[in-house]
Every structure is written in structure tokens, then in C-alpha cells.
Amino acid sequence: MAEEHILVVDDEKEIADLVEVYLQNEGFVVHKFYNGLDAWQCIETMHLDLAMLDVMLPDLDGFELCRKIRESHNFPVIMLTAKVEDMDKIQGLALGADDYITKPFNPLEMVARAKAQLRRYKRYNQGNQDNGDCIEVSGLMINRATHTSTLNGKALALTPTEFSILWLLCENRGRVIPSEELFEKVWGEKYLESNNTVMVHIRRLREKMNEPPRKPKYIKTVWGVGYKIEK
């Protein structure tokens, strides 16, 4: 089995070292840095399977690093943040992060979150060739086996989480998927009432699909319930 490489960036040495130890104990190869610029050099030269980025870095902050990653990479990104304000979480998700962990955190929970993101990433990048791995809806085509999606022949650059959401909606086209169900199936965690995560990812998906926010053609909002894609 190929080793999985995880980037860890945090300017608090104790936290970075702790994360490194727990991930190495699970068999991961860890690339650890205390600043964003050194981390970016690693991103440009190494094959990575996941990145864990601290938001507050002394040079290139975690938000900017996430934005740069999403310009050319689709591996999962988890933000490590001491900030608890919703807007900070939304900013990270809007830039393409797949998840966030608020400090102080339980190292075992951190490992579980990393494994969950890696499972999703491998599932949708490797997939299997069973029937039903490709769905087409009015010019939107999504292929689970190859982790590719196109809209009217033009490729969509989706993160693993965005792909998971779009696949779930397409697979259940015609049915309204409640936000709670979407979150729990995609993230594998219990939905909290004030969670804006699904909303932010839906907004990013619509932007990538050039959907008009008020009258989207594909991903429809059913107010107070959830989201659906028509048959």
C-alpha cells in the first residue's frame, strides 16, 4: 500500500510537533513546516495527499496558502484555527478548504478527521468501474470512477468535498436533500444547527458552474429544507 503524505503547517512548534507525532503513529509521512513560504516550496515539489494549515502564520497565512493550493491541486485541505468566529470558518471554506478544526483540539479527533478526508479523496479519485459511476443531467456530466465532472463539455475543477456534494445531489436527482443529511453523508459527522458549511460549499459549486445565484439552473435551494438537482 502506498504511503500517504500529509503537509502540516503551524507556527506554534508544540502543536506542529504534536500533530506530526500522532500522524506518524498512524503510518503517514509528514512534511512539517512552521511558516507558509517553506510549505509552499514543498507543495510545488512533493506529491501530497492532504494539507493541514494553521490560519495564523508569520508570512503566508493559511487562507492565502489554501487559495494558492486550490489554483492547481485538489487534495483535501483542513484548516487549523484558533479563531471561532463563523466568518473566519466561512472564509476558509470559501477558499476551498474541506474542513476546519478549532484549537485546542483532541489529537485523536484530528487524526479521525484527516482519515475521513483521505478516504473521500481516494474514493473519488480512484473509484471503481462499476455501472452507475457516470451520471449526466442536462449537460452536466459527473464520473465517480475518474473523479471528473464537466458542464457543457467544459471541465469543472472541484475539490473532493465539492465533488462529493455534487455526486450526492446528482445521484438523488429529483429529491430534496436536507442540509443535515448532506452534511452527515459527506462529512461523516453529526450536523450542528448553526453549521454554515454546506451553504458555503453549495455557493462555491454554483460559482464554478457559473450559476446565477438567484435563479440557478442546476442546484436548487428549497428554503428551510435543503437542496436538489432536477431530473
Image: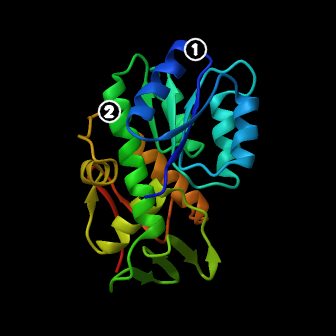
Amino acid at pointer 2: Ser
Determine which of the numbered discs, if any, sits on residue 131 in the image.
Answer: none
**Residue 215 image position (x, y, % from top left):** 50, 64
Task: Give the amino acid at mark 1.
Answer: Glu
The label on residue 12 is 1
**In the structure shown, which secondary structural element does the residue marked by tag 1 occupy?**
loop
Estimate how packed mark 1 is, as few (under 14), some (14 to 19) or many (20 or more) residues with alpha carbons within 10 Å.
some
Mark 1 and mark 2 in contact (Cβ < 8 Å)? no
Q: Tell whether 185 sits left or right of 67.
A: left
Against 213, residue 42 (above or below) is above
Q: Nearer the viewer, mark 2 or mark 1?
A: 1
Residue 135, given in percent of the width and then of the height, sits at 41, 81
**Quadrant placement of the C terminus:** bottom left
Q: Which residue is mark 2?
A: 194
Q: Quadrant of the N terminus?
A: bottom left
The quadrant where residue 133 appears: bottom left
- Crowdedness near tag 2: few (<14), some (14–19) or many (≥20) residues, C-alpha within 10 Å: few
Q: Is residue 199 above or below residue 8?
A: below
